[in-house]
Image (spheres, helix red, strand yellow):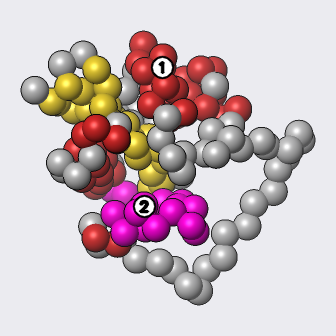
Amino acid sequence: MSNIRLMDMGDYPQLIDLWRNTENIGLSKADSPVNLDAFLQRNPGLSFVILDDDKIIGTLLGGHDGRRGAIYHLAVNKEYRYKGYGKALLNHCLAAFADIGIERCHIHVYADNQSGLDFWQKHGWFTRPELVLLSKDIGNPVKVDR
């Protein structure tokens, strides 16, 4: 039996294990317990886990800047993929965004992650060829493990 609930810091050991074992999830210091806790505090009610009994089988981090939503770390355990769990997490988060007045949401996907791109486009997301993502590390360079 699976169900969706809000993510909390007690989930951290299972979260980090799932993320480390999911291809195309980039991990950095932003995913440390302290930084994840701060993210959840800044974005209450927008990050979810889906469970099979007590086992976390999927995650989604949701946040916003007051205008646009952003989704990070949508991950589903390999054994549970293609059963609608990712879509369920996504719909849950989008409904939470709509409840607080967020009308558009963005996602970053690695360019070579074809299965990820396929998932997002299948669910109505579109590329923005007129935009280019630029980043700048502030202070120490951010190391992303992928």
Asked if labels 1 and 2 touch by Cβ distance under 8 angstroms, the answer is no
Q: Secondary structure at mark 2?
A: helix
Q: Which residue is mark 1?
A: 12
Looking at the rendered structure, the kind of residue marked 2 is Gly
Q: Secondary structure at mark 1?
A: helix
Residue at left 25%, top 40%?
80
Of 47 and 74, nearer the camera is 74
* Quadrant occupied by the C terminus: top right
Residue at left 23%, top 44%?
85
Which numbered mark, 2 or 1, is in the foreground of this view? 2
Residue 92, horizontal then vertical, whole percent: 24, 46
Residue 88, horizontal then vertical, whole percent: 21, 47
Looking at the rendered structure, the kind of residue marked 1 is Tyr
Residue 101, horizontal then vertical, whole percent: 33, 56
Left or right: residue 18 compared with residue 111? left
- Write down the region rendered in magenta: 101-120
- On the question of residue 68 being in view, the answer is no
- On the question of residue 1 being in view, the answer is yes
Compare marks 2 and 1 and give the one earlier in the sequence.
Answer: 1
Dividing the picture into quadrants, the one containing residue 46 is top left
Of 49 and 95, nearer the camera is 49
Residue at left 44%, top 55%?
69
User: Alpha-carbon distance for marks 2 and 1?
Assistant: 23 Å
Can you tell which mark lies on residue 116? 2
Bin the neighbour count of mark 2 within 10 Å (Cα to Cα): few under 14, some 14-19, many 20 and up. Answer: some
